[in-house]
Structures are given as C-alpha cells and as structure tokens.
Image (cartoon, rainbow, N blue to C red):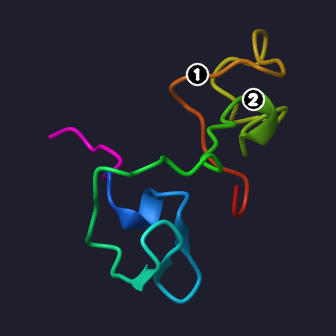
C-alpha cells in the first residue's frame, strides 16, 4: 500500500489557525478539500547523511561513502528531525 499526501484542507496553504479557510472565509475541517486547493509550501524532505543518527557513528552502514547531501537505505532521524 502506497502512502500519499492527501489533497485536503490540512495541507492547503489557505488553511489557517482556528480551522479557517482564508480563500472562502469560512470555518472548515481538515477533512475537506475544494477546487481552490493550493499545496502548503512548508513541506520539506531534508533527509541526508547530516540529518541521520548514524552519521559518523560506528553503526553507519556506509562509513566510507557517507557525506553531506547523500542518502542511503539505513537513514534514521536525529531526535525530532
């Protein structure tokens, strides 16, 4: 089963605090979506060796290749990364 980002209000740039749609000027729920959906630009994927808990540690799967900007199948987040 593939996991995908939903095109719903919680991921829309017009969904503001208090469950309010700034486009339609109404209170909404994160379950809703509309034709004016605009993906929130704040989503980031910064996974690479520098953000990996194994980087420069003895349990690094590829110590001779690990470098900033690289990613491998053994990546694990640092703390709340």
Secondary element type, mark 2:
helix
Give the image location of residue 53, x and y in percent: 72, 46
Give the image location of residue 27, x and y in percent: 40, 87
Taking the spot 55% from the left edge, 51% from the top edge, the residue there is 40
Q: Residues within 10 Å of mark 1 (few under 14, many from 20)?
A: some
**Left or right of 49 in this view: 56:** right
Q: Are marks 1 and 2 in contact (CB under 8 Å)?
A: yes
Q: In which quadrant of the rendered image does the C terminus lie? A: bottom right
Residue farthest top in this picture: 65
Q: CA distance from mark 1 to mark 2?
A: 8 Å
Look at the image and give the residue range highlighted in magenta. Answer: 1-6
Q: In which quadrant of the rendered image does the N terminus lie? A: top left
Q: Residues within 10 Å of mark 2 (few under 14, many from 20)?
A: many
**Left or right of 19 in this view: 70:** right
Taking the spot 47% from the left edge, 79% from the top edge, the residue there is 25
Which residue was labeled with disc 1?
Answer: 72
In this view of the protein, which residue sits in the foreground, 3 or 19?
19
Q: Is residue 30 above or below residue 44?
A: below
In this view of the protein, which residue sits in the foreground, 21 or 49?
21
Q: Name the N-terminal-most of marks 1 and 2.
A: 2
Give the image location of residue 32, x and y in percent: 26, 69
Secondary element type, mark 1:
loop
Give the image location of residue 6, x and y in percent: 31, 52
Circle number at residue 49: 2
Taking the spot 82% from the left edge, 34% from the top edge, the residue there is 50
Q: Residue 66 appears in which quarter of the rendering?
A: top right
**Left or right of 44 in this view: 73:** left
Q: Residue 48 appears in which quarter of the rendering?
A: top right
Magenta residues: mostly which secondary structure? loop
């Amino acid at each position: 089963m593939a996991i995908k980002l939903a095109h719903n209000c919680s991921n829309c740039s017009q969904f503001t605090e208090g469950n309010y749609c700034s486009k339609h000027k109404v209170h909404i729920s994160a379950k809703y979506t509309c034709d004016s959906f605009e993906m929130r630009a704040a989503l980031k994927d910064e996974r690479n060796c520098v953000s990996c808990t194994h980087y420069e540690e003895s349990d690094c799967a590829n110590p001779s290749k690990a470098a900033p900007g690289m990613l491998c199948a053994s990546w694990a987040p640092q703390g709340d990364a």
